Each structure stands twice: as structure tokens, then as C-alpha cells.
Amino acid sequence: MIVCAGDSEQFDFATPIGIGMVNSAINLTRLCLLNPPEFLLFVGTAGSYGNHKIFDIVESRTAANIENSFFTHGAYTPLDNIVSTADNVSRETIINSSNYITTDSTLSSHYLQQNIELENMEFFAVLKVAEELQIPAGGVFIVTNYCDKDAHKTFIKNHKEAMEKMSVYMRDRMERM
């Protein structure tokens, strides 16, 4: 089963599950309970903390849920905030998920020190649902912006081209399967 966020991030080969962690978790759980997939693949856009360039396509099976305030010592969590379906997590690109987009570029180095390279609003929820339902899962992401003050403006500027590039990439990938 291939899923995507929806709204402006829809693909003709993927089922939309909603934007953000809550909507995607609710809708994906419903989908998986009604029609359990053998594998779950999330496709979407991502912001880069600096190691990946615009239009890079990255595959991952590991996500984190770390809020910016964690790095400024303004918050803590008693929850396990990393989930992975990978066999070797040390070789994974970790995708951070939050319902907020990082616009403070000074925080990027903190994420990179934790081996977290990209952010996407839904992926952590997707992997948590997959983990709970014991479904193998992963994600494919295309970088649309850097996590800086111009994040939204750059996302808007690159979005159409990114969606086209992701569609070509996924069609080629599906043909090889």
C-alpha cells in the first residue's frame, strides 16, 4: 500500500491519509484495519537540515519525533521518540516529524548531531501505526526546502517540480518491482 499526505501532496499511485501526525495516524489505522497491506510505503516531501540538497530523493525506514524546544532545554518527553522498521538503524537517514515546520536554521546542527537529516510531518505517525499493526514500512522523500526562515517560500517555489520528480522516480521504482 502506497500512501501520501494528501491536499497539495497527492499522487495518482498513492492514497491520501491526511496532513500532520494525528490525521495521518487516524486515517492510516482505519485503512490498514479495513485492508491490511503486506507493506506500507509513505511518499512525500521533506525539509533538509542541511546535508541533503533540494530535489534529493531519500528512502528511509526510521523516524523521530523531536520538537525544537528539546534542544533549547524547554521540553522533555518520557516517550520513546524514535521508531524504525530497518534492520540496521545506523545506516538509516532519520526523518524527524512534528506538526511544526522548523524555520530556525540554528537548530539544524542539533538535529544533524543526532543523525536526523530531514523533516516530514507525517512519517513518525506512519511508522508508529505500522509498528503497532506489525506491518513492514518505509518512506520515500523528496527535499523541497531547507529548514530555515524561507522554508515555506522555498517549499512553495519547489513543490510542483518536486511532485513531478517524485512521480517519475516512483513510476520507475514500481516498474523495477
Image (cartoon, helix red, strand yellow):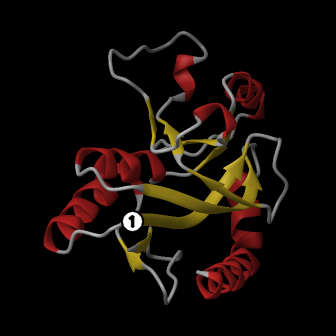
Closer to the camera in the image, 106 or 142: 142
Instruction: Tell me: residue 46, above or below residue 90.
Output: below
In the drawing, does residue 82 fall left or right of residue 159? Answer: left
Q: How many marks?
A: 1
Q: Residue at x 42, y 71 (%)?
A: 3
Q: Pointer 1: residues within 10 angstroms few (<14), some, or many (20+)?
A: few
In the drawing, does residue 59 fall left or right of residue 11? Answer: right
Dividing the image into 4 quarters, which one contains the N terminus? bottom left
Q: Amino acid at mark 1?
A: Phe
Instruction: Tell me: residue 143, above or below residue 157.
Output: above
In the drawing, does residue 136 fall left or right of residue 51? Answer: left
Q: Which residue is mark 1?
A: 39
Of helix, strand and loop, which one carries label 1?
A: loop
Residue 122's spot in the image, x, y percent? 44, 54
Closer to the camera in the image, 133 or 67: 133
Residue 32's spot in the image, x, y percent? 23, 66
Q: Residue at x 42, y 28 (%)?
A: 81
Closer to the camera in the image, 152 or 111: 111
Q: Residue at x 40, y 64 (%)?
A: 40
The quadrant where residue 27 appears = bottom left
Q: Residue at x 46, y 66 (%)?
A: 41
